[in-house]
Image (tube, rainbow, N blue to C red):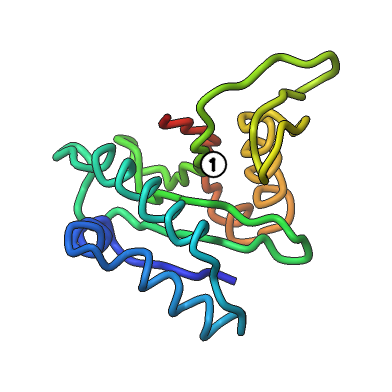
Amino acid sequence: MLIYQKTKKDFMNDVAGGLIADIIDEQIKLKMHRTTGKSEMRSWSNSLNYMFFVLNDNQIPDDAGIAIEYNIPQTSKRVDFMISGYDPTNKPNVVVIELKQWEEVKAKEGDALIETFTGGGQRTVVHPSYQVWSYAKLIEDYNTSVQDHSIGMVPCAFLHN
């Protein structure tokens, strides 16, 4: 399930108009039949404003696809942000982005684990780069459109704080 799907131009207008969090909230109500808490609304407003500045680049075409809150089928995994388009050789690609507002992280023993303040306390969690890589691999492995059209999946973590 996909909560938000528009072009870069539309996304930029939605953010500039201060509408993006409300649009996503309304789509979640319609598609998932649930309400959104204030902290999640703030998170969208904050993180998506940062994405506005990242995408405010003329080299990224206005018709590039933007997807927000993509629920990977058959999982409880949810991709924060995706940008789709074509590279200079006309090959289709999707940049899969995990957005984090963390201010500090600490290395932990073990593969792909870190410690950070999230959910009201210090917690050991999966590193966001590993998290988004696993999302890209799930999509790549189980989405026939990605396979049939040789769509490149490019994972990226953006810790903007």
- Vertical order, 89 against 113 (above or below): below
Along the viewing direction, whichever of 15 and 140 lies nearer the viewer: 15
Q: Residue at x 67, y 46 (%)?
A: 119
> How many callouts does the rendering have?
1
Give the image location of residue 11, x and y in percent. Answer: 27, 60
Along the viewing direction, whichever of 90 and 28 lies nearer the viewer: 28
Give the image location of residue 127, x and y in percent. Answer: 68, 28
Which quarter of the rendering shows the N terminus?
Answer: bottom right
Splitting the image into 4 quarters, where does residue 65 fall?
Answer: bottom left
Q: Residue at x 73, y 49 (%)?
A: 141
Give the amino acid type for the residue marked by disc 1 in the picture. Glu
Splitting the image into 4 quarters, where does residue 121 fall?
Answer: top right
Residue with the most extreme left position: 58
- Vertical order, 113 against 13 (above or below): above
Q: Is residue 81 left or right of residue 142?
A: left
Residue under label 1: 98
Q: Is residue 74 left or right of residue 104?
A: right
Along the viewing direction, whichever of 8 and 85 lies nearer the viewer: 8
Give the image location of residue 140, x and y in percent. Answer: 66, 48
Residue with the most extreme right position: 110
Splitting the image into 4 quarters, where does residue 111 fall?
Answer: top right
Give the image location of residue 122, x and y in percent. Answer: 72, 31
Along the viewing direction, whichever of 128 and 82 lies nearer the viewer: 128
Q: Residue at x 67, y 16 (%)?
A: 106
Residue with the most extreme front position: 120
Which quarter of the rendering shows the C terminus?
Answer: top left
Q: Is residue 19 left or right of residue 148?
A: left
Secondary element type, mark 1: strand
